[in-house]
């Protein structure tokens, strides 16, 4: 079998991005490989060396192919991750996502893809071409990014956490898409959950503690890989610490948290949300479900005061209608929030504890110095979530899974009466998922806290969930 890529005793040039020991790995034609391991285990570092994104200080990187005429070696290797789906204008797009009448600088899918619109996935992206990139759902964004990556028909394709944020149907479709690409392209997936290793994967490489294990055939790996058994049980000391932190938050005087009537949200004639009535009372725990594009994120944007359409809708927050003189900060101070969009825009090289502290003041970073009391509070929450080792580590030096966990801690840090969690466990490995789920469940039980949570995975929902709202996608104009 011809080798597609071989790394021999590779060591990255950047000392802050090195594995614990030199790494060696060979991938052959016809193989579909999963790099599997926990958050921060070193998967991204290994993929960076294999793709050439991380230059080597020592060792050797060899490809079993030469670029075709008129192409560079970099044209033959593609890397897909969710964070860069919007390109280089993330902060602007984050604001314009809910202000869609301001379309300046936001390209259509056709404009963003250019010649890539006629690539291998042309038939799949054709229905999206006329829409702006900021209008795409999570699943559609993933397809858009994949179409751009494979337009040049690369020989080697890396995909980081391909299934996060996708509903069950979209996961099945995306897995089929990857399997189709794997027939002509060597596909390498970066995965942190055992259940997400797709059936077309032929070999698995376990990467943990910044060490690279052997490449094993799929069936051999399945016999040796163990399911996590700990992380979901909190000790009495941890429960006590959680209760003490929870008590530092405020409790709204009103039992009404959210009240919606006759919500009708459309953009450019496209219906994105239809909801006749929804009431959330203090202490209730809601699971918000529905396929990608059903309007879940739009509904949450109304609740969290990000979407100005709230002023034109029948929505009340904490017992008051919008537009009564309150600022968005009056609303946000009572809400702890995390979302895929927040992860996409938060990319500042500040200590992780400062990102957490931003949750105290609803900023993406600090606009003022953190007091000693505030820092202690942040560190206490980070200890509960197992993130205490990253307190002074620059946020951008963390793995994507570690960054997601930091943003989840940020949602809890002010002990809010309302948690609005949009895919909060995206990208967390199996053990961290169990612990975060247990902490969430224990938190909402400590004192009439309210929870609204979106997840496409039933096993992510904590036992405290006692109500569900299912949204249906509206495709009519």
Image (spheres, helix red, strand yellow):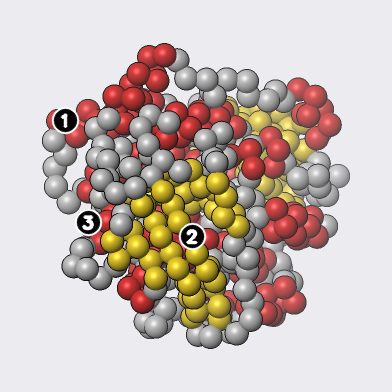
**Displayed quadrant of residue 179:** bottom right
**Residue at point 43%, 64% (across, down):** 260
Q: Quadrant of the C terminus?
A: bottom right
Indicate the position of residue 153 as horizontal and vertical percent values: 71, 67
Say the numbered circle drawn on residue 277: none
**Residue at point 64%, 42% (across, down):** 458
Q: Residue furthest top?
A: 236
Q: Secondary structure at mark 2?
A: strand
Q: Earlier in the sequence, mark 2 or mark 3?
A: 2
> Alpha-carbon distance for marks 3 and 1?
22 Å
**Residue at point 41%, 60% (across, down):** 259
**Residue at point 35%, 32% (across, down):** 447
Image position of 76 (left or right of 370):
right
Q: Which residue is mark 3?
A: 330
Residue 470 appears in the figure: yes
Indicate the position of residue 401 as horizontal and vertical percent values: 49, 41
Q: Considering only vertical position in the picture, is 385 above or below 267?
A: above
Q: Which residue is mark 1?
A: 373
Q: Which residue is mark 2?
A: 278
Residue 134 appears in the figure: no
Image position of 457 (left or right of 48):
right
Indicate the position of residue 30 as horizontal and vertical percent values: 83, 49
> Alpha-carbon distance for marks 2 and 3?
22 Å
Q: Do the CB atoms of the residues marked 3 and 1 lie less than 8 Å apart?
A: no
Q: Quadrant of the N terminus?
A: top right
């Amino acid at each position: 079998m011809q080798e597609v890529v071989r790394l021999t005793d590779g060591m990255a040039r950047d000392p802050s991005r090195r594995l614990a020991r030199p790494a060696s790995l060979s991938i052959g034609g016809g193989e579909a490989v999963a790099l599997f391991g926990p958050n921060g285990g070193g998967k991204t570092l290994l993929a960076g060396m294999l793709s050439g994104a991380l230059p080597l200080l020592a060792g050797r990187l060899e490809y079993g192919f030469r670029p075709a005429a008129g192409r560079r070696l970099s044209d033959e290797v593609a890397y897909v991750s969710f964070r860069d789906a919007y390109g280089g204008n993330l902060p602007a797009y984050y604001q314009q996502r809910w202000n869609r009448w301001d379309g300046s600088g936001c390209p259509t899918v056709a404009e963003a893809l250019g010649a890539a619109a006629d690539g291998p996935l042309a038939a799949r992206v054709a229905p999206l071409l006329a829409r702006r990139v900021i209008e795409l759902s999570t699943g559609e964004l993933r397809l858009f990014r994949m179409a751009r990556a494979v337009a040049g028909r690369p020989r080697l394709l890396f995909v980081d956490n391909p299934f996060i944020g996708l509903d069950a149907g979209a996961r099945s479709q995306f897995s089929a898409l990857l399997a189709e690409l794997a027939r002509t392209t060597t596909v390498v997936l970066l995965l942190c959950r055992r259940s997400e290793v797709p059936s077309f994967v032929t070999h698995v490489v376990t990467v943990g503690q910044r060490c690279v294990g052997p490449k094993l055939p799929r069936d051999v790996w399945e016999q040796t890989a163990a399911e996590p058994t700990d992380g979901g049980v909190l000790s009495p000391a941890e429960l006590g610490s959680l209760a003490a932190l929870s008590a530092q938050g405020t409790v709204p005087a009103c039992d009404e948290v959210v009240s919606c009537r006759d919500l009708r949200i459309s953009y450019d004639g496209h219906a994105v949300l239809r909801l006749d009535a929804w009431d959330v009372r203090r202490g209730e725990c809601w699971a918000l479900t529905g396929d990608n594009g059903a309007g879940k994120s739009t509904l949450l944007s109304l609740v969290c005061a990000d979407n100005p359409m709230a002023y034109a809708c029948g929505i009340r927050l904490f017992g008051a209608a919008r537009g009564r003189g309150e600022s968005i900060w009056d609303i946000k101070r009572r809400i702890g929030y995390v979302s895929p969009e927040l992860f996409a825009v938060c990319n500042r090289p500040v200590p992780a504890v400062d990102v957490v502290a931003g949750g105290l003041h609803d900023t993406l970073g600090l606009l003022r110095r953190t007091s000693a009391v505030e820092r202690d509070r942040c560190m206490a929450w980070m200890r509960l979530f197992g993130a205490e080792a990253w307190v002074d580590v620059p946020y951008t030096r963390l793995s994507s899974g570690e960054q997601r966990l930091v943003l989840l801690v940020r949602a809890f840090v002010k002990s809010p009466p309302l948690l609005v969690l949009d895919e909060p466990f995206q990208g967390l490995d199996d053990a961290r998922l169990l612990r975060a789920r247990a902490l969430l469940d224990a938190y909402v039980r400590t004192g009439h806290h309210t929870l609204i949570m979106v997840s496409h995975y039933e096993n992510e929902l904590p036992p405290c969930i006692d109500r569900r709202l299912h949204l249906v996608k509206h495709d009519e104009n």
